[in-house]
Amino acid sequence: MGTYINPNNDLFKQILKNKIYVDKSLLIEKTNEIIGSNESKLCVSRPRRFGKSTDACMLAAYYSKGADSSSIFNSLNIAQSDSYWEHLNKHNVIYLNMQDFLTGSKSCADLVKLITIKVAKELEQAFDVPIDQKDYLFFILSDIYAMTKASFVFIIDEWDCIFRTTKKEDYETYLDFLRTLLKDKPYVDCVYMTGILPIKKYGTHSALNMFDEISMIMPAPYEQFMGFTEAEVKELCTQYKMDFGEMQRWYNGYHFKNDISIYAPRSVILALHKREYSNYWTNSETYESLAKYIEMNFDGLKEAVIRLLSGQQEYVDTGTFQNDMTTFHSKDDVLTLLVHLGYLGYDFENKSVYIPNKEVEDAFIQSIKNCHWDYASEAVINSNHTLEALWNRDAEKVAYYIEQAHLETSILQYNDENALAYTIYLALLAAKNYYTMVREFPSGKGFADIAFIPFQDKPAMLVELKWDKDADSAIKQIKEKQYPASLAKYKNNIIMVGINYDKETKKHTCIIE
């Protein structure tokens, strides 16, 4: 056994000792189905903290001839699979974490050389054959196969780190290395490659077209392995006596086909450990990284972010994204990257993106505070003041803060109640800490424009919007159509709000009862 050739199972044993471990071993059943076939090359991309390296360690521990892993896998779900014993510790494994090699390299050429030297040295020891370490790795493996018929399962973690940190001129060297190493080679039993980004594209073509790509945009048929499923999170909440509804609000929102919905694993685990629902994307690097992308100077990007923050979805053409972090030609490319980074969810049917949960929404809000969006940043900061003014029934202050938010949303076409609703959402971003905000809420004899349904002991709020009419008529409509009837359990604690925008004076007015 070695570090790269047929590693032991020590890393996976450490993972199993964690206080919280969710059994994802049925992923092995999926890879067992394709091993040795022409469909045995997978590139699985997911955001940070979504369990990529855990899966890579698990697969290495299961397949590697350098370990006896029956004692650790016998108690996992995969042990019930018909293919369990057929492949358990029966394969030669080459396990590579590209980030480790990149750390010790000054260029991509250095990285390729370092991989070749380290792997060749262990191959020579494992197979007792003479090897020229100056040779190309695919020649070395081809010679070993010719002499011994030894084939390999390749497990490559952080495969895309090159595209996140190095210069563009290095990309082709790296991709050529992977292509010649893995494409159409008899010594390849299976490749499981994982990272944040899908495979680099040149134009519309994949640079490594022999891979089946699994991503946050195209996860089938591996949806249940992209994160924690709803059933898994419910079970954890029951076990740790935590509120599932709050867990859902904070960390859910990545919806796939077939009613599969996944949660951010690391955030769920931290919430359970700390017994507190919070934003665990809290390091400054996260906010600065997000701010860097949403500040890019592409037509419509700023407006799209405002609509997303207001709870809307945004259509995105994902086909033009080149699958790196430097090549952007439009707002769609930026928004597609944010899907792969986990900052946005993707609606498969409508081809649109959305902010998936409160944790990510908080990251957006913090990032906007660091952006050079002067009015938007001010509106975000002021949203707490707007909410306080509503609770205090200070209509004049509410109108003032809405006016400030309008300075930002004036970049949108401001000509109807929908546009006014965007302004209200921006002015009241802080309300999402205390309320579920529902557009067109079924109430009484119609639909209230916006209903604020409280999580805790805050007052419920019904907001009616008018365009070029008056705020009095908004309050009158709330009463005449009996909107409060649908919030009967809050009947002694409901705030009614009427807001109007006068297109001639360009002023907002507000009445609160």
Image (cartoon, rainbow, N blue to C red):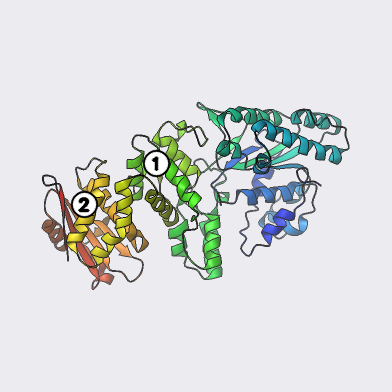
| Residue 209 can be seen in this image | no
Q: Vertical placement of 295 versus 453: above or below?
A: above
| Residue 62 can be seen in this image | yes
Q: Residue 287 location in percent, x, y?
A: 45, 50
Amino acid type at image mark 2: Glu
For the point 13% across and 45% down, the residue is: 503
Q: Residues within 10 Å of mark 1 (few under 14, many from 20)?
A: some
Q: Residue 173 location in percent, x, y?
A: 64, 28
For the point 15% across and 57% down, the residue is: 474
For the point 60% across and 40% down, the residue is: 161
Locate the C terminus and report the quarter of the image it occupies: bottom left
Separation of residues labelled 1 and 2 (CA atoms): 23 Å
Amino acid type at image mark 1: Glu
Circle nearer the N terminus (1, 2): 1
Residue receiving disc 2: 403
Residue receiving disc 1: 295
